[in-house]
């Protein structure tokens, strides 16, 4: 019992840090939480290790729940362009289906390798790439379906949405680990605007990926039981998800004033650290 309590505290800490990362970068936190869940699930006392795809699915649940309330708040107060969100979402659908197919077929070691390489590549690009100059902020609220605050070409947004959708369903990243750098480095979006767009896209992408996994049968009780999932895993996931929601709510209102360059540098360090952890 004491050993399980220790893991409850570890999952609570992981959820808190994930919520902090969501508030700081607008990313879902999957680059952090997937490796953590994968490591902790494989060291639970008295339980067999579970495949990495289970960690990916758990990440999607925690990130989806943690980001949904913030996404609704951003939409309610018209703090993002629905045009941008709509084009990104449209671009993500087919790649997300491909990601689900790959997730259910690739081995855990292959997923870990691809995951680590992706994080390292994005981290290096974020650290050393040259971002496009960001346009000035649009005065007043963002038009719900207008393009006043969005100067990106729709084909560019579709391509960015496609990359983020694939990363979401295949790696449990929520999509914004790729989305945040792409929006700031290529779509000429200011970091704080990219954070807001990313948070809404995270909610959409994770729920979309979970729905596709459900339709494929990957979330059926029999499949989960066959993969070694038990009630203890469900309890730990619930603790993680609760702390993600609480922490994201707490930190999101306190980290809005961070300068763009500092935010990008911290994101690069975070992604490189996660890549080293996965490739160790």
Image: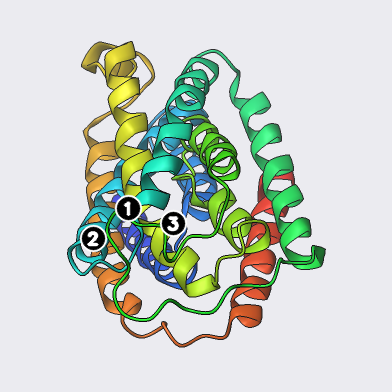
Q: Residues within 10 Å of mark 1 (few under 14, many from 20)?
A: many
Question: Which residue shows up at 30% across the image and 50% down it?
Answer: 4
Residue 150, disc: none
Q: Which of 185 and 176 is in front in this view?
A: 185
Residue lying farthest to the left in this orientation: 76
Does dot 2 land on a helix, a strand or a loop?
helix
For disc 3, the marked residue is: 198
Q: Residues within 10 Å of mark 2 (few under 14, many from 20)?
A: some
The answer for how far apart the CA atoms under marks 1 and 2 are is 8 Å
Q: Which percent across, then down, holds residue 182?
A: 62, 54
Please give left or right for residue 181 compared with residue 241 in the image. Answer: right
Question: Which residue shows up at 67% across the image and 56% down it?
Answer: 186
For disc 1, the marked residue is: 82
Nearer-N-terminus badge (1/3): 1
The answer for how far apart the CA atoms under marks 3 and 2 are is 12 Å
> Which one is closest to the eye, mark 1 or mark 3?
1
Does dot 1 land on a helix, a strand or a loop?
helix
The answer for how far apart the CA atoms under marks 1 and 3 are is 12 Å
Question: Which residue shows up at 58% across the image and 39% down it?
Answer: 155
Q: Nearer the viewer, residue 223 or 262?
A: 262
For disc 2, the marked residue is: 75
Q: How crowded is mark 3: few (under 14 residues within 10 Å), some or many (20 or more)?
A: many
Relative to 14, say whether 121 is above or below: above
Does dot 3 land on a helix, a strand or a loop?
helix
Residue lying farthest to the right in this orientation: 128
Asked whether residue 43 appears in the rendered view, the answer is no
Relative to 3, say whether 184 is above or below: below
């Amino acid at each position: 019992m004491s050993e399980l309590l220790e893991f409850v505290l570890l999952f609570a800490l992981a959820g808190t840090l994930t919520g902090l990362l969501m508030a700081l970068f607008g990313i879902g936190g999957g680059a952090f939480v997937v490796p953590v869940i994968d490591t902790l699930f494989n060291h639970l006392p008295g339980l067999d290790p579970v495949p990495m795809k289970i960690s990916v699915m758990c990440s999607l649940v925690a990130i989806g729940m943690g980001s949904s309330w913030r996404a609704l708040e951003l939409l309610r107060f018209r703090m993002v362009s629905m045009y941008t969100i709509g084009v990104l979402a449209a671009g993500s659908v087919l790649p997300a289906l491909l990601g689900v197919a790959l997730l259910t077929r690739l081995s855990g070691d292959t997923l870990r390798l691809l995951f680590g390489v992706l994080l390292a590549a994005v981290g290096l690009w974020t650290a050393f790439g040259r971002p496009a100059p960001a346009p000035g902020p649009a005065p007043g609220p963002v038009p719900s379906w207008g393009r006043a605050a969005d100067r990106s070409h729709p084909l560019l947004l579709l391509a960015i949405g496609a990359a983020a959708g694939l990363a979401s369903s295949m790696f449990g990243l929520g999509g914004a680990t790729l989305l945040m750098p792409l929006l700031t480095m290529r779509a000429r979006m200011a970091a704080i605007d990219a954070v807001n767009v990313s948070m809404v896209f995270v909610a959409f992408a994770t729920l979309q990926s979970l729905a596709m996994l459900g339709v494929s049968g990957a979330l059926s009780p029999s499949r989960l039981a066959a993969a070694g999932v038990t009630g203890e895993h469900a309890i730990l996931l619930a603790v993680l998800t609760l702390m993600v929601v609480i922490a994201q709510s707490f930190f999101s209102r306190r980290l809005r004033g961070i300068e763009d360059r500092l935010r990008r540098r911290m994101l690069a360090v975070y992604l490189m650290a996660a890549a080293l952890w996965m490739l160790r």
